[in-house]
Amino acid sequence: MTKVIEKDNGYRVASSLRSDSHARRPMLLNYVVARDENNVPKLLHIPLGFGEETLPVFSSWGMARNFALSYASGEGWYVKECSAGELSSLLLRPYAGIEWVLFDPLPGRLSGGDAPTNLMARERFVDHLLLG
C-alpha cells in the first residue's frame, strides 16, 4: 500500500492507494505537539483546571505550531503529523490515562475555569478517529 499526501480543501490528507483496485481512501491527518524521549514521542498534555489533563490535537500544522509556541516550554518540542491509526494507538496505549482531547484549541484560551466547547472524551475521540 502506498501513501500519498495532498492538499484537500486546505487540509493535508493522506490517501491510501491499493494496488489491486487503485481505489483512493482519504484520511485526514492530525497534528500534536511532541518531543522525543528515548526514541519515543512524548506528547504535550496540559492541565484542565479540574484535576484532569487534556491532549491538544490539531487539524493543521500551523495551528499546532502556534499553540506549541505558547505552551511548550523547553527545547525539543515539534509538531508531529499523525494518521488516525497512529493517534488512536497513542491514545489507547501510552496515553490511555489522558481522559480528554481538546481539538483545535487556541493559544491563550485555556486560563479560565470553564471547560472549552471543543473538549471531547478520549474514548469518543478514538471512536471518531477509527470510524471517521
Image (cartoon, rainbow, N blue to C red):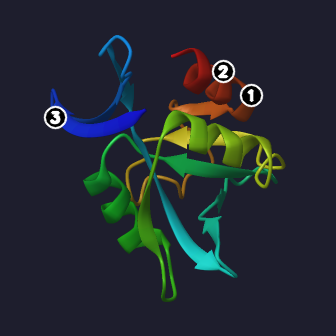
Q: Quadrant of the N terminus?
A: top left
Q: Amino acid at mark 3?
A: Gly
Percent x, y of residue 28? 38, 31
Q: Position of residue 67 (x, y in %)?
A: 39, 61
- Return the x and y of residue 101 as percentages of the image width and height: 62, 40
Seen from the viewer's position, the closer of residues 119 and 15 is: 15
Separation of marks 3 and 2 at Cα, in angstroms? 24 Å
Does the CB distance between marks 3 and 2 fall below 8 Å?
no
Report the residue marked by disc 1: 123
Query: According to the image, label 2 marks what residue?
Result: 127
Decide: few, some or many residues near mark 2? Use Cα within 10 Å; few <14, some 14-19, many ≥20: few
Which quadrant holds residue 130?
top right
Instruction: Please indicate, yes or no, whether residue 11 appears anywhere in the rendered image.
Output: yes
Query: Are the residues at dot 1 and dot 2 in contact (C-beta closer than 8 Å)?
Result: yes
Picture coordinates of residue 56 (x, y %)?
54, 50
* Residue 121 location, quadrant: top right
Q: Residues within 10 Å of mark 1 (few under 14, many from 20)?
A: some
What amino acid type should be assigned to the residue bearing mark 2? Answer: Asp
Number of the label disc, if any, that sits on residue 10:
3
Residue 11 horizontal side relative to residue 25, left or right = left
Q: Residue at x 38, y 15 (%)?
A: 20
Amino acid on which disc 1 is placed: Glu
Q: Secondary structure at mark 1?
A: helix
- Residue at figure coordinates x 61%, y 63% from the top left: 43
Mark 3, other Cα within 10 Å: few <14 / some 14–19 / many ≥20: few
